[in-house]
Structures are given as structure tokens and as C-alpha cells.
Image: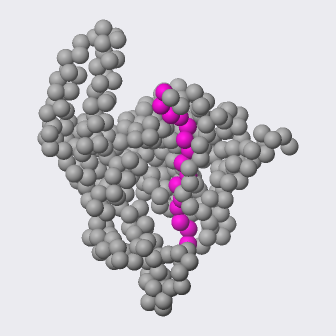
Amino acid sequence: MSTGQQQQHGQAARIRSCTESETFDLAGQSVATITTTMEAAFGTPFLSSEQAEMIRITFITGAGKQARSRYDPAAAKTVTSILGNCGYVEDRGASCVVESAGCYKMQHDTGKNLKTIVVFPELVVNNRLTDDANEQTSTSLLPKNSPVYKIAIASMNVFPVMLERECPSWSQKKTCLESIQMMQQLLQELEQNLLKGKPLSEAEQDFYDSVAVQLDDKEALVKQELATHVEEGKVTQYEKEFLLEQNATRIQELKAAGKSTTKATERKALLEAITTVQPPLPLKHHNKLGKLYKELAPIQHLSSDSGKLLSLKETKALVRKEEVLQEIQHLEETSRGWFEDDDTFEIRVQTSHE
């Protein structure tokens, strides 16, 4: 076996041996290497304990101008293609919960200027696939009980309430819109197949029958809500900076194409006029977390590696510290909202500590 093959199999083994969320950098790897690694890593479900806990495996597939040359231009496409071949589906609302098993999502870390793909592996517990992962791959193109699936099947009586409750921020609504547009595109492709006389698979037929529920109306509603957020200044500082950056890029593109920039310039003025930005939304479990942060503060300094012999009281406090930290981690992770990217969520977590 060559050194390159050993490296490929070695990385696949490291991916499959993950017991907690980890990040893998694909810089310097060719399409062939990425293909071999991804097929070996995700071709079969991950083994898990009886109490299955989801992990997040992140692949860095691209970067900004200074580091762009380090990544193969086809890295991201290769990763998603192999994941699709392995039965994984894209779900932009996926999070680190068992219900997201067998899903992946693409993200752009604007803070670090990195492009990533986050994978939530399929799990097998006692030789049995997790129910949600097994169900989603056999009967639907969308993960059952995922945010995208719930949005797809919701009636227009339910959807406005769902949107406000589950996607309260501008960022969440933006990704919700992208998910709706993704479903519209998929429906169009299926309709083209039907017009050509090509029969749909069971999963495609299930998607076609259950998802085509007023998607155009949902798209229009979300677009209106996004506009309202900006008009009323209901955006965070992070969202305002993102919108201004997006607007600047749009103005440059219009100028390069010789087109009018009037509307884009008006939008820039509207964004710059937002002087009082909205603070990050509190975490779902902020009350419980507040009590745990307070309990942790006086025992945070305790450590078994200090070299100091701990008293019985300190030993008990150290045990309690580990319990509190685990509970905090669980409550913070389960506070992540629908379609919430890592940057936005991290800002909310940091704010909750203040």
C-alpha cells in the first residue's frame, strides 16, 4: 500500500473513530483522495452506544483569497456528491441531534472566511439504524421530522405561526427561504421527469405528493418578512454587517455589468440608517443556564491536574463541576434554533455568558 493510500485510509479511520464533534481540513487533498476518504468514512453507518448521541463532523473545503489555492476547486462538490451516493441528504436546518442522522449542510464561516460542510453521520445501535435515519432514506427525499420537512408539509394556516416561532431572526428566515427555493427547484426537476414520461421512485413520489403545498405562497411570505426585518431595523450587528457586505458585492456586480445601481444604493442607505441593532436572541434554556453559570463560577478554578491534594469538600465540588459543565453543554446545544449557523449560534452562546 502506498503512502498516499495509507493517508487516505488513515483519515477515514480517524473520521469513523470520532466520539465527539471534530473538524477535518481538506487542504492539499485531490479529488481522488477526497473521494476515497469519504466513501470509506461514510459508506456504512457509524457504530454508537445504546444511548446514541449525535456528533458533528466538519470538513473545511475552501477559504478566502489568501488560502483559496490550498483547496481543490471541486472539493465541496466531491464531498456532497459522495455523501449523496452514500444516502445522505442536505438539510440546512440539521443540528447535532439524533433526528439529523444521515444529513449534511454547507456553511460559510464568514468570521474565519472558510467554507465548510457539516455532516451528521448515520448511526447504528446494536446493529439497528436509528429509526429516523432509516425512515428518511427509505421513504422520503427529506429527513422526516426535520425543519425542512415540517416547512414543506405545513399548511398556510400553520406556516406563518411556525415561521415566527421557529425562525425568529433574519438569518434563520433567510436560510428558510433558501430551503423553500431548493424544494421548488427539486419539484421542477421531478415535473420535468414526469413530462418526459420518466416514472418517479417511491421516495420521489412521496416528496412530490406531500411537499407541493403552497411553496410559492410560503416563499412570498418569507421574502416579505425578511424585508420587514430590515425596514424595522430588526437585525443584529452581525446580520447588518453581512447585509452591507452582500450589498457592496451586488453594487460592484451591477457596475461591472453596466446596469443601474439605484435600488442597490437605496438599500445601502436603508441598512446604514439602522443605528440601533437588535441584541442576539436569548437561548431557549437561558433561565436554566443562568442558574448553572452562577453555580459554576465559584468552582470553575478547581482541577484534578493542579498537583494539589484536594480536600473532601473540593473533591465533591470538582465532581459537581463536571456535572454542571455537561449539563451546560447539553442545554446550550439543544438551544440551537432552526437554520442557525455556527457563527450566529456562537454569538448567542457567548452573550448568554455575559
User: In which quadrant will I find the C terminus?
Assistant: bottom left
**Which residue is at the far top?**
258
Q: Residue at x 33, y 24 (%)?
A: 249
Q: Residue furthest right?
A: 1
Residue positioned 65% across, 53% down in the render? 15
Left or right placement of residue 351 versus residue 142 in this view: left
Q: Is residue 3 left or right of residue 56?
A: right
The residue lying toward the viewer, choosing from 67 and 71, is 67
Residue at the image position 31 percent from the left and 67 percent from the top: 285
- Does residue 261 lie above or below 17 as drawn? above
Q: Nearer the viewer, residue 192 or 32?
A: 32
> How many numbered callouts?
0
In magenta segment, residue 57: yes
Quadrant of res 226: top left
Question: Magenta stretch: residue 50 in it?
Answer: no
Residue 34 appears at what percent x and percent y? 66, 38
Which quarter of the figure has residue 215?
top left
Relative to 198, residue 179 above or below? below
Residue 156 visible at all = no
Rendered residue at 67%/33% (across/down): 31
- Does residue 22 appear in the picture of this structure? yes
Per the rendered image, the range of residues in magenta is 51-65
Up/down of 153 relative to 26, above or below: below
| Lateral position of residue 205 relative to residue 297, left or right | right
Q: Position of residue 72 (x, y in %)?
A: 61, 30
Residue 343: % across, % down? 38, 47
Of residue 332 and residue 28, the one placed in the foreground of this image is: 28
Picture coordinates of residue 240 (x, y %)?
A: 25, 38
- In this rendering, position of residue 282 left or right of residue 336: left
Task: Say above or below: 263 vs 32.
Answer: above
* Quadrant position of the N terminus in the picture: top right
